[in-house]
Amino acid sequence: MNYGLQHIAKIAGVSKSTVSRVINNQPNVSEITRQRVLEAIHESGYRPNEAARALVTHQTRVLSIVIPTALSATFTDPYFPALVQSISMAANERNYAIMLWVGNSAEEADRYCDRILNNGFFDGVIVASAVDDDPLLKRLVQTELPHVLIGPAQQQVLCNVDVDNRSASCEAVTHLLNLGCRRVATITGPLHTGAARARLDGYLDALKQARMTVDESLIQHGNFDEASGYAAMKMLIEQHIDGVFCASDMMALGALRALLDSGLHVPDDVALVGFDDMPFAATTNPPLTTVHQPLAELGSKAVNLLMSLIEGEPLPSKQMILKAHLIVRSTCGTAKIA
């Protein structure tokens, strides 16, 4: 049976207001009294009314995750479920629940923002994979609601956590060049996202460091999905490429299928590298060389940063950039030249 505050107070031999202070973790309660109340709560199986407690403490112990992308993409691209899982695990460790908001392309931007910002039943927001000039970010920076962006910093957002997309992409393309590839192409993500631009910049950095001329015909644009990777690779095959860097594993999966459908062998004819290190990357045929993103660390860092904002703690850093590294598998093969 779930007894009320009066019953807990009677068991512990304290006032009802003292029980309330213990439940809401308020000061001015001795440690001995606090332990006695906690034991009474445990014995009676008391469960506080979260909505009522939120009115008193002004905290709901709920965090919102906002993924401002199409609903279909959120659940077909394994990147997003993996990221949500990492955030949820970190939040659970801090005794916080998660509220998930997914973008709806059919809904007006203002109405979507209003639904989130006027909800009120959460303490802070983590925004993942925002596009440039995202209207929600504009609205968030005008509020006092704690928020953290996962991705490159933009729009005066106070705090963000990201991976070093540019350096990791440069490493991946340099690996292809070191294998002897000389017609190295790239399939970018949508360039209205900071991550896609940074990965393109990494591709260009690698060419520059190798003193190679940029051939615009070897740059094709995708949408971080398998279909766009397939279509872009079909275009690149006509350019007699021998290596390709894809800005996501999903696009690399489509690119691999296009190469095989065209009768080309990977890696003998074309070497291939992706980005993300999704679980399927190790089981493609052949297994995919890719850049590993530390998604578990990305989620936990974002939650910890948001907790500091919510609880008024000193910020360890307003911007955190995590390392990503290349995982070499069979889609690269061995060096083509000595």
Image (cartoon, rainbow, N blue to C red):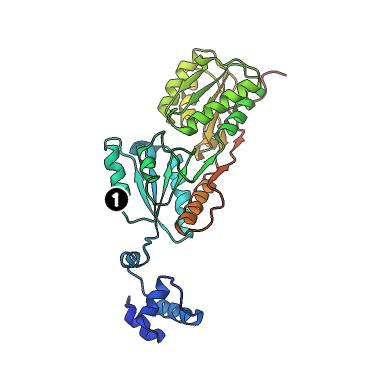
Neighbor class of circle 1 (other Cα within 10 Å; few <14, some 14-19, many 20+) is: few
Q: Considering only vertical position in the picture, is 99 above or below 212?
A: below
Q: Nearer the viewer, residue 33 or 239?
A: 33
Q: Please, which residue is most extreme toward the front here?
A: 142
**Residue 281 vertical position relative to residue 143 in the rendered view, above or below:** above
| Quadrant assignment for the C terminus | top right
* Quarter of the N terminus within the rendering: bottom left
Q: Is residue 272 left or right of residue 82?
A: right
Determine the residue positioned at 57% across, 25% down. Answer: 203
Image coordinates of residue 62 in percent, x first then y, are 38, 57
**Residue at 57% of width from left, 35% of height from top?**
291
Instruction: Tell me which corner region of the image, top left, top right, bottom left or bottom right, holds residue 193.
Output: top left
Quarter location, residue 12 = bottom left
**Residue situated in front as seen by the camera: 187 or 194:** 194
To which residue does mark 1 refer?
118
Which element carries disc 1, helix, strand or loop?
A: loop
- Residue type indicated by callout 1: Asn
The extreme right residue here reads 338
